């Protein structure tokens, strides 16, 4: 029964997110939205998008599709110039996006915060199991 609940919660969370990739992007410190348009100015709806991290234009780090307005949103985990490329029926659009800066507000979860919280939860679980085992032990005989 707990497995069914976990599965149901997972499906609800995925349904509430814009995309499954957004649900798994815990360490993104910036949310970036880019809008692609064809040469005639029309939005590139349902175009395949590839995103490249700063300084590495050979390895794709994120993929997805644009929405009906040609917009694509992704989480960036570091500052720098990110490159996004959209393709649909022979049209190609590229964008370089500067992420970060002194005047920009950062968001997302810190990896140190997540790992620290997991260690605290683990310590609580071990302590609880210890107390339960201690309470179940029979006391000394009369």
Image (cartoon, grey):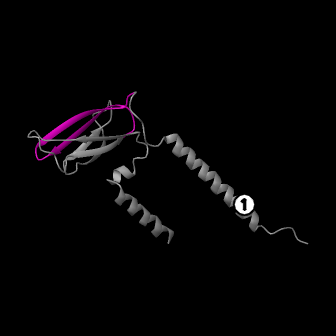
Q: On the image, which quarter does residue 115 sit in?
A: top right
Q: Nearer the viewer, residue 84 or 35?
A: 35
The residue drawn where x is 43% and y is 46% is 26
Determine if the magenta segment contains residue 7: no
Residue 124 image offset from top left, x and y in percent? 64, 54
Along the horizontal axis of the image, is 20 left or right of 95?
right
Most prominent secondary structure in the magenta stretch? Answer: strand
Residue range corresponding to the magenta coloring: 76-101
Q: Is residue 134 above or below residue 109?
A: below
Side (left or right) of 16 relative to 121 = left
Q: Residue, x 42% and y 36% (percent of image)?
A: 106
Q: Which residue is mark 1?
A: 131
Dot 1: what SS? helix
Q: Which residue sits furthest right?
A: 142
Residue at position x 20%, y 36% in the image:
94
Q: Position of residue 10 (x, y in %)?
A: 41, 61
Give the camera-side residue of 103 and 84. 103
The C terminus sits in image quarter = bottom right
Percent position of residue 119, x then y: 59, 48
Residue at 26 percent across and 45 percent down: it is: 72
């Amino acid at each position: 029964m707990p497995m069914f609940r976990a599965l149901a919660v997972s499906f609800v969370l995925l349904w509430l997110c814009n995309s499954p990739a957004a649900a798994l992007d815990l360490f993104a410190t910036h949310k970036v939205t880019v809008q692609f348009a064809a040469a005639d100015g029309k939005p590139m709806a349902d175009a395949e998008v590839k995103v490249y991290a700063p300084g590495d234009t050979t390895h794709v780090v994120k993929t997805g599709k644009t929405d009906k307005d040609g917009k694509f949103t992704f989480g960036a985990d570091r500052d720098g110039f990110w490159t996004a490329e959209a393709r649909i029926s022979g049209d190609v659009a590229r964008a370089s996006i500067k992420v970060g800066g002194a005047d920009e507000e950062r968001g997302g979860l810190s990896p140190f915060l997540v790992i620290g919280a997991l260690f605290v939860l683990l310590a609580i679980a071990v302590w609880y199991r210890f107390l339960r085992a201690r309470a179940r032990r029979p006391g000394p005989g009369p």
